[in-house]
């Protein structure tokens, strides 16, 4: 069974921040840190030597840069002031100002101006409709079983 995201890492629009490649507190960052720790700081020279047996290891310097970026992340999640997801998004700020976890909890849902692009607005609507119909716990369980990037 897939791990259910902690509530503070599920955006008011319904996206799972915990599985975003930019989330500094998420699963990708945790796994990238684990890989980096397993390889250790001195793996670069070994990768060079092992490249004769595994040509992909010739690309290790580029991989290490990506791994470092994934391990650090750039965003602490949409429910923080330092969110970086989408500059035009009005959902996270509005929910925070109203003290809500999800738009579905708002008496004014659905609102007219989310600032989201059409595809993401459809996901926002479907997620929050799901929360209203089935409840928060059912939504979070379903979210955990849904691929983050579709």
Image: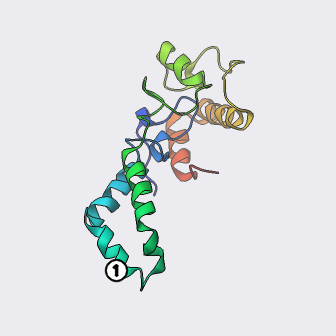
Q: Position of residue 126 (x, y in %)?
A: 68, 36
Q: Callout 1: helix, strand or loop?
A: helix
Residue 105, image x, y percentages = 55, 22
User: Is residue 22 left or right of 90 when viewed as pictured?
Assistant: left
Residue at image position (44%, 81%) is: 54
Going 51% across and 49% down the picture, which residue do you hit?
Answer: 144
Give the image location of residue 127, x and y in percent.
Answer: 62, 36
Quarter of the image where one finds residue 9: top left
Q: Residue at x 50, y 45 (%)?
A: 20
* Residue 22 vertical position relative to residue 114 in the rendered view, above or below: below
Quarter of the picture containing the N terminus is: bottom left
Residue 113 or 5: which is nearer the viewer? 113
Q: Is residue 71 above or below residue 76?
A: below
Q: Residues within 10 Å of mark 1 (few under 14, many from 20)?
A: few
Q: Answer with the quarter of the image where residue 130 lies.
A: top right
Residue 37's spot in the image, x, y percent? 27, 60
Quarter holding residue 23 = top left
140 to the left or right of 126: left
**75 or 78: nearer the viewer:** 75
Number of numbered discs overlaid on the protein picture: 1
Which residue is disc 1 drawn over? 49
- For the residue pair 150 and 59, the one nearer the viewer reads as 59
Q: Residue furthest bottom?
A: 53
What residue is shown at x 37% (from left), y 50% (from top)?
71
- The image's colour scheme reads rainbow
Position of residue 71 in the picture relative to residue 19 (left or right):
left
Q: Is residue 66 left or right of residue 36?
A: right
Taking the image as drawn, is residue 52 in sight?
yes
């Amino acid at each position: 069974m897939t791990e259910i995201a902690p509530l503070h890492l599920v955006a008011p629009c319904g996206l799972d921040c915990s599985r975003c490649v930019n989330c500094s507190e998420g699963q990708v960052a945790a796994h990238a840190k684990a890989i980096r720790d397993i390889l250790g700081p001195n793996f670069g020279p070994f990768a060079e030597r092992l490249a004769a047996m595994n040509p992909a290891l010739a690309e290790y310097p580029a991989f290490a840069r990506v791994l470092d970026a994934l391990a650090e992340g750039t965003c602490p999640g949409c429910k923080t002031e330092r969110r970086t997801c989408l500059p035009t998004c009005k959902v996270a700020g509005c929910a925070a100002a109203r003290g809500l976890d999800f738009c579905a909890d708002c008496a004014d849902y659905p609102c007219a101006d989310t600032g989201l692009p059409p595809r993401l607005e459809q996901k926002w609507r479907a997620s929050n409709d799901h929360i209203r119909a089935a409840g928060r716990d059912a939504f979070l369980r379903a979210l955990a079983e849904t691929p983050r990037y579709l």
